[in-house]
Amino acid sequence: MQTGVNFVAKTLGNWVSALWRPLCFFGGIAIRNACMLRNQVTTSEWLYSPSGPRVLIGSGTQREFPLLEPRRPIGIVSTFTLAAADFCPFPSRRRFIHSAIALSTSFLLPKREYSLAPNPSSLALRGTSSNPVIQQVPARPPSGNSVPVSGPIKFENVTRQSGVTFVLDNSVTPRRLQPETAIAGVAIFDYNNDGFMDLFFVNGAHLTDMDKHDPRYWNRLYRNNGDGTFTDVTEKAGIQGKGFGMGVAAADYDNDGWVDLFVAGVNGSQLYHNNGDGTFTDVTAKAGFVEAHWKWATSAGWFDYDNDGLLDLFITNYVDWSAATEPLCTVGNAVTYCSPDVFTGEPNMLFRNNGDGTFTNISEKSGIGKHIGKGMGVAFADFNGDGYTDIFVSNDTFRNFLFRNNGNGTFDEVGVEMGVAYNQFGKSIAGMGADFRDVDNDGRPDIFVVGMAGDTFPLFRNTGKDFEDITGESGIASATARLTGWGAGIADLDNDGLKDLFVACAAILDNSEEVIHLPSKLPNIVLRNTGRNRFVDVSAQAGPSFGVPGAHRGAAMGDLNNDGRMDVVVTNQHALPEIWINRTANFNHWLLVKLVGTRSNRDGLGSRLKVTLADNNALYNHATTSTGYGASSDPRVHFGLASFDHADKLEIWWPSGIHQALTNVKGDQILVVHESVN
Ligand SMILES: [Ca+2]
Ligand SMILES: [Ca+2]
Ligand SMILES: [Ca+2]
Ligand SMILES: [Ca+2]
């Protein structure tokens, strides 16, 4: 963006009104009026000159506003149209200005912000909770004794040489039926316990009969051979599937040491038990699931809501849909996928694991079933540090849900009071994928959720009391305002100790070129965490093939080649998936922790981990496989250690309540930790 734009930057105070007006101006007449109404600030005609305007755009923190004068703001105007339209309705003027300013800065100055140097300290607040995980909160990311040579985050798409030939088939119909655009997810999991993460892809079915008999519609399981190649073992595993699939959730629900699979679908879902010999058995009926349970399920996730050592199953349901009743939706002469608004939402479901291979539907009893939404992604974390795992659900064109686990078998939906129900403009977004992790290493899990163009992708920072929307000031709003995201994940992609963001992007309409004159295929994006809760879009530096657009959907995160760099697998409609091997070149160290629960669930899901480095700074993460949209990620808990070759201390708070501490843990290894019952 610096091309052709000539800035003058200086620091001034009290330029709030002057700075604010041009942002509204960019939004056009309607937006300008809205701003005038709320804030009684009149627009200046001199800004409205269509030829060569000198536009003042502020940036910086609240007290100081460096001014930027783009002498030739070509190309800026169009971006601000969208951003300003969203910013103007912001209820608090001060906050609005701050957000808008942050947005303008990061948009105008990507090069200035883009730094490969070790990161400055974060803005994390210090914890006050009595919870031991949250209590000790060194606020700064690690700064090592030796400076790491940090190259940009880089990915290489290795699908073509990997042997993975899966093509996601959504069975496009002339009517454009709703499930077509919503598919589908992917799992990164180790089904044969050889230490290499394998891949499972969910596939569609023939429409409108929802039949999977043609192998083109089979779900596919690929064994990771450990040498960069994968072998299709679908038939041997007996896991071709049934019906029109959506999402997948992997975990060892029966604690036998073999990871099992739940596949969520439009017309029924399936539970597959891993037999430990390379085969799976469909145990859906045996486990107590009946036809009446099934609604259109998009995602699912395993977690232990009552800490009894048995993983329970949460299923996000979307809308009440059938091919027979779906209306024909059009824009002009073009048939399009309908807005979710034309369908009735569905409640989500929670099934308790009885420990004998069966499950009990406790959706009503737990309070989960009381809330009707249009569920898409689901992510777990203990946001309030009470030792019980909570649930975040993103809803499509409906407010997000945050189910607080009360620890007594019930949940309260607290999305509104906690500040995560709506985006910073008070708007419900077309929520898609979500991840729920501690991005600023203050010991409190934050929430990242993605939506459609105009929503921006909210980042909700957990303050310890509630969540603060930092999408604008973090730089994420400007990077994502024009994007539509599906899969999403939070992971430290360059092992510098700060978790970064990855989003699989594509429009919802496959004919959006025709309908709204916008591309239907989009490139994925990666946003680098530069500390101080700031993120920079580094997609352009992420490798020569990274910017290739696609009809991307699900994204799972994990380390496929066990080199400590987190890889990403993205599904792509009518195309091969993208297996993005992380090629980031630097000298940063890392740690992958594979948990083996004994009193807790065997996968250790829900465990909270804290790494303390030699400079007393701390890093936090927790064990979960439920990330993004319809995706299931590597269960191992990843840490980038920056320049530190070891962790002074690794602490684990298991769901059982057991606290375990290891000292002087060597970095650059996959560490297996068995839950200590002493
Ligand atoms: Ca494996
Ligand atoms: Ca199992
Ligand atoms: Ca990072
Ligand atoms: Ca890797």
Image: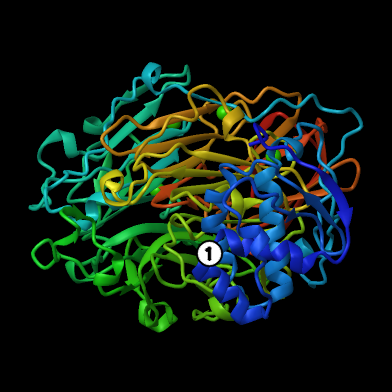
Q: Looking at numbered disc 1 in the image, what kind of residue is underneath it? A: Ala
Residue 240, quarter of picture:
top left
Who is closer to the viewer here, 413 or 103?
103
Q: Position of residue 21 (x, y in %)?
A: 67, 65
- Residue that label 1 marks: 85
Query: Ligand 1 is located in which of the four quadrants?
Result: top left
Helix, strand or loop under label 1 = helix
- Residue drawn at x 68%, y 37% is 5
Q: Is residue 30 left or right of residue 500?
A: left
Q: Position of residue 205 (x, y in %)?
A: 16, 46
Who is closer to the viewer here, 575 or 651?
575
Q: Is residue 637 left or right of residue 269?
A: right
- Residue drawn at x 54%, y 52% is 624
Q: Is ligand 3 within 8 Å of the beta carbon of the residue shown at mark 1?
A: no
Q: Is residue 389 left or right of residue 554?
A: right
**Above-or-below relation of 16 to 529:** below
Who is closer to the viewer here, 391 or 610?
391
**Above-or-below relation of 277 to 396:** above
- Residue drawn at x 38%, y 51% is 630
- Residue drawn at x 60%, y 27% is 154
Q: Position of residue 365 (x, y in %)?
A: 40, 83
**Above-or-below relation of 155 to 238:** above
Residue 372, quarter of picture:
bottom left
The colour scheme applied to this rendered structure is: rainbow
